[in-house]
Each structure stands twice: as C-alpha cells, then as structure tokens.
Amino acid sequence: MKKLMISKLALAVSVFMLVFYTSCQEKETEKITYVNLVNRLTDLEVLAQLPNEGEKSEMWASYDRRSKVDSITGEFINWAANNDGLNPQFIRKEGNNEVLAEMTGPGAIVRIWSASPRKGKVNIYIDGSETPMISESFIDYFKPTIPAFDFSELVYETNAKGFNNYVPITYQKSCKIVAEPGWGQYYHFNYITFKKGTEVEKFDPNLNEQTTGALTKVNTFFQQKMGENPSNNELTMSSQKTTLESGKRTIVFDLKGKGAIASLKAKVQTPNSKNIEEILRKTILEIAWDGEKNPSVWSPIGDFFGSAPGFNTYKTLPMGMVGDEMYSYWYMPFLKGAKITLHNYSDHPVDVTLEIGEDELQGDSDNYARFHAKWHRDLAPVEKARWPDWLLLKTEGKGRFLGASLSLWNPKGGSNTNAGEGHYWWGEGDEKFFIDGESFPSTFGTGTEDYFGYAWCDPSIFEQAFHSQSIDSDNMGYQSVNRWQIIDNIPFQKSFNGYLEKYFANDWPTQYATVVYWYLDADGKDPIKATPEDELFGYEIPFEVYRQPDALEAENLKVTKNTGGWVNTDAFAHESMYKDVSGHKMLFWGTDKNKKNNLVTEFNSDKEGRYDVYANIIKQKEGGVFKISINNQKLKNINFKSSNDTKYTERVKLGTVDLKKGRQEIIFDLLKKDKFPQKLWIDYFEFKKR
C-alpha cells in the first residue's frame, strides 16, 4: 500500500512537471508574423538588443568556389580567386538546373541582389514542398511582376546598375533555391535564421490586406519621409552650439542615468568653406557610455555621418547629409550616463551645433548593447597566405554588425579589361565575414561594389534606404559608399571578424578609410584605437593622370545603337599602358561572331570646318578590322590586330571630314568575321583643322 502511494505520488509529480514544462515551452515559443518581420525593415531600436542564441544572418553567393580553407590544417587555398559568377557559381547541379542556395528554418530571405538577372526561371521551394512557392524569371524578382514585389523602394535597380530586392520571404523548416538555364549571372541571397522553436508566418506571394499594408507603409516612408526619424517615440530634444578653437576638446553633452540617444544631428560651420573637407575630417566625435575610459564611438564627424571627404548630400534610413545638416537615427542605449565630446585637430576655428533626441529605455535594460562606430584607415595586416584580405573589423563579445561606410582614394583608376582574372579595379574585393570563430566565412561575397548594392564598376551617384554612393569621380579619384545592414544585420555570440578583399596596395595608390558600425555587450572587446592626429587628413598619395590635350576621349562617346556584342565606355586599359592611354580609359567593343556588328555613337562639338581626324587605338591579338565613318563620311578601315601577343597603342590618321556645330555621329562596323569575337579598343580622337 505504501509503495502504491509513493508510485501515485511520483506519477502525479511527473504529470505536474510535464504540464509545467510544456507550459513553459509554450510561453517561450516566439511567434513572428509576416507584418512583424516587415516592420523590422525600419525598426532601428530592436537592433540595440543583444541577439538570441541560435539567431544568425548568413549569405549564399556566386563567389569563386576555388577559394577554400583546409579543414585540418586551416590553410587558405586559392584565397584570391576572382572568377566570381564564372567558376562555378552554384552549390551543385540537379540535371540541367543549378542549386543556388539551401537554408534550414525557421528563417527568412531578407535580401536578393544580382548584377545580371535574366529570363531563366529561379524557383524558391519552401518547407520541403515539391511545388515552388515562387517560379519567375530571375529578372522578374526585381520588377513588379507579382504583387509582393510591387514596391519600388524595396525592389529596384540602382542608378549604378545593381538589382536589389528587400521583400522578406519566410519559411518554417527549409528553403531551397533552384535556377533553370539562362537565369543570369551573379547573385546574393542574404537570409536570417531565428532561434530554435520560433514559429514564423508562411510567406504568400499573393499578399493579403495586412501584409500589403505593412509593405506599403515601409515603401511610402522610404518614398516620402526619407531623412526623418523612423521611430514614433516621443523624444526629449536638446541642442548645444559649441565654438571649438584649434586644438580644443569639449564635452558637449554629459548625460546622467539611463536612456538612449535615438537622434543625433550636427551642423558644422567654418569661416572658410574651402576648408570643409579638412574640418569634417579633423573634428573628432567621441561618445563614451556608462563611464567607459575608451569611447565606443570615435570618428571624424563627417565620416561618422556616412560620407567623406567633405559634405555630400544623400539620404538613407539611418544616416544622411541634407541641406546644412547631418543626421543619425541609430539607437544608442546607456545605463549609467553618456558623454559626447568634440575635439578640433584642425588649425581653424569651427562652430558645431549638436542636437540629440533622448528616449526612455523600455523592457530589460540588461538586454541592450552598446553602440560602436570606429574610423580607421588600416588595422593589423593579415598573414601573406590570406592576401588580399583587408581587415574591416575584429571584435569579441556578443553583438550585431550593422555595416560600414567606405571612403576611398583611387586616382589612377583600376584595370578591369575584359573583366578577366588578374585585371582588377578597386571594387573587385569580396566581403568575408567570419562569425564566432567559424573556419570559413558564412558571408562570402562577389565584389566590394556588390556588397554596397550596385554593380559593374558603375560610379554613378545613388541613394536608397539601406545604401548609397554619394561621390562620383568616375572611379578615378574619391568614391564614397555605405551599406547599412538593418533587417540583415549580422548577430554574433562570441566574435565577428570582417574583411574586404583589397587587391591594390596603398602605394598604387588605392587607400581606404572606413567607419564600421556595430553593437557590443558591455564586456566585449573593441580593439580599434584612435588614429593619430597627423594621419587624419592629407594622407592621400598624389597621382597625376596622363591626359591628351584637346582630345575627344572615346569613353565619353554616347552609345545610341549596338547590334553586336558587349560595349563598355568605362573600361580601363591595362596598367602597363597607363603612360600611353589618355585618362587610362577607352571605348571597348567586343563583337558577336553570330551577328552583323554595328555600333553607333555620338558626341557634341562646337567645331566647324574641314578637319583631319586621328585616333589613338590599342592593338591586341584579338583585334578585328573595322570600318569607321563620321557623319556618314567614310574614313580609313583600321586593323586593331597586333603583330604579336602584346598590347600597345598606335596613333593613326583616319582621314578628313567636314564638321558642323552640334551633334556628331561616329559609326563602327566589323568588316571581317572570325570564329572568335573581334575586339575594338579606342583611346581618343583628335580633330586637326586643315
């Protein structure tokens, strides 16, 4: 009887524990609706919360898969391989199809990018279904072909040729992406994984009223309110104007207690506007949280706000420069106070007006991380075996990586002739992000400009919610780009080691300066130190590009018709010819062996009369024979084929033409086909009056 009573008691306890455990499990189960997820596209506050165990952000991409890390020795193999999108650009083949990505849920695709999407279908299979949830031509993933993608600020091609799609696609158990022949070239699929046990609402490409409303709200904000704070919280605003004499360091705000800076704006004024680049680089913004000795934010004030050198107008979601003001809406919590300090290292006085908006912290204060933003030009070099990696950020602890702004000096340009391996320009370098000590990066990209959301070396200015290019120096001078990882932020539990490949050395000269942004727990390690005063400004190595006086640069011709192959007006000559190629660039035309090749270009001129026409051409072994005419006046046929395997320039007289002021037309025709495509490279034209 006693044993029976004990057994019944044990059974009762077991049942109670089971019910209690099940109840706890039910309470711990997080449910994410599709609307919840869409709201994360503009929610900067949630980024400040430390990541959950199991939370991840990774990427499948068309990187060159010859790059490997030996699992036993840790040796980096073919680490500089650069045939991204060509060698091969998929996980494996299934028949004639290519598997581009495979993920295990619960999770969501949060960014799709491509440089060259085409008509072949890309199929997305969700949760083991044999029927694709989406089956569209890859190009249609970036157009309003289906209702879910009909949001122009989330699905678009940038002004610099990059195709982007930020509409989230959720899955509970798994996701598989399979491409059919002819789908295109180059891809990124950024995806996030939620902690185990999370329930995620299934994506439906046929949106309902709630999901349409959520996406429309975000899209409308990006269209109409970019530059405004995306938070609806009521902030306590404070403004302080400070005059900083040369060498002066001043604490502008000394905040006490607990709270968060949810808005930070700055106006910088100097008596001489010609000095603005120096002022914005030599005025340092420091922010220290909770009494820390080494500030978590240390950056030249201009660079901190996402563009440099100088003041360059642009607007993105968290950062921008508009009118005479710079803004930041990153959410910056503190528990025991915050100090905002300015230091003027320049020889000139400067007036700075800082405005902050403070918010009250909600929920568990211990779950908030510290905001970090650090400027640097070069950190510790990596070992020779892993060239061309350039260290972007190395940090230890728990936190989230938010992205970077990159200012670069590249006066000589960069060779990208034929886009062949070994001919690099500054943007060729892949991003490689190693999370929590992983041996191979879970984010491995296809090019620096691809990371920043555009493509094909295009230096054109653009601005979107999550990225921008705010300086256009035609890839021969300064460029300034940024990328903010909001919904695609990268959580880490132990460490984040991020690199960009940099093929050109500083003395090329190609010199980088960056601000990296991330959250880190209070016990985490931020090893980036302040840059010495004499290395802040004027460090750029000068270089004067050879320019032929009074020449019509062929790369400046406007292409109006092309019935042949690929034409490029932003093609760099090989660096061995930089002394002979004006502006280092040329008009490149690679004809199609299967078509009648005709290229029509135009330019405007104020010249009038009769002129002898000369051209500086580049001869090479793949060169063809081309007929050239100007304004329907036939000129001399030119053979672009070299007599040996070398490339060299040759100045040739084409003939004589009559010009009238205004629009002029230059037509190129391939005269003789070959089994291989024939190429035409022209540096410049000269017109000498008779």
Image (spheres, rainbow, N blue to C red):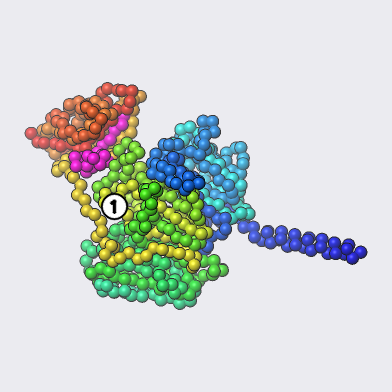
The residue that appears at 14% across and 33% down in the rendered structure is 613
User: Along the line of sight, which residue is nearer the eye, 413 or 656?
Assistant: 413
* Residue found at the very far front of the displayed protein: 73
Question: From what the image shows, is residue 272 above or below residue 187?
Answer: below
* Residue found at the very far right of the displayed protein: 1
> Within the image, what quadrant is residue 5 found in?
bottom right
> Within the image, what quadrant is residue 276 found in?
bottom left
Q: Amino acid at mark 1?
A: Asn
User: Along the line of sight, which residue is nearer the eye, 218 or 67?
Assistant: 67
> Within the image, what quadrant is residue 554 found in?
top left
Question: From what the image shows, is residue 55 above or below residue 95?
Answer: below
The residue that appears at 31% across and 71% down in the rendered structure is 343
Few, some or many residues within 10 Å of mark 1 (<14, 14–19, 20+): some
Image coords of residue 319 (percent x, y): 39, 60
Residue 573 belongs to the span the image colors magenta? yes
Image coords of residue 649 (percent x, y): 19, 35
User: Along the line of sight, which residue is nearer the eye, 7 or 413?
Assistant: 7
- Residue 479 visible (yes or no): yes
Q: Is residue 32 left or right of residue 256?
A: right
Residue 100 belongs to the span the image colors magenta? no
- Residue 224 visible (yes or no): no
Question: From what the image shows, is residue 96 above or below residue 577?
Answer: above
Which image quarter holds the N terminus?
A: bottom right
User: Along the line of sight, which residue is nearer the eye, 470 or 377?
Assistant: 377
How many numbered callouts? 1
Image coords of residue 451 (percent x, y): 41, 49
Image coords of residue 340 (percent x, y): 38, 72
> Disc 1 on helix, strand or loop?
loop
The residue that appears at 36% across and 61% down in the rendered structure is 375
Q: Which residues are magenta?
A: 572-591
Which image quarter holds the C terminus?
A: top left
Provide the residue designation for mark 1: 506
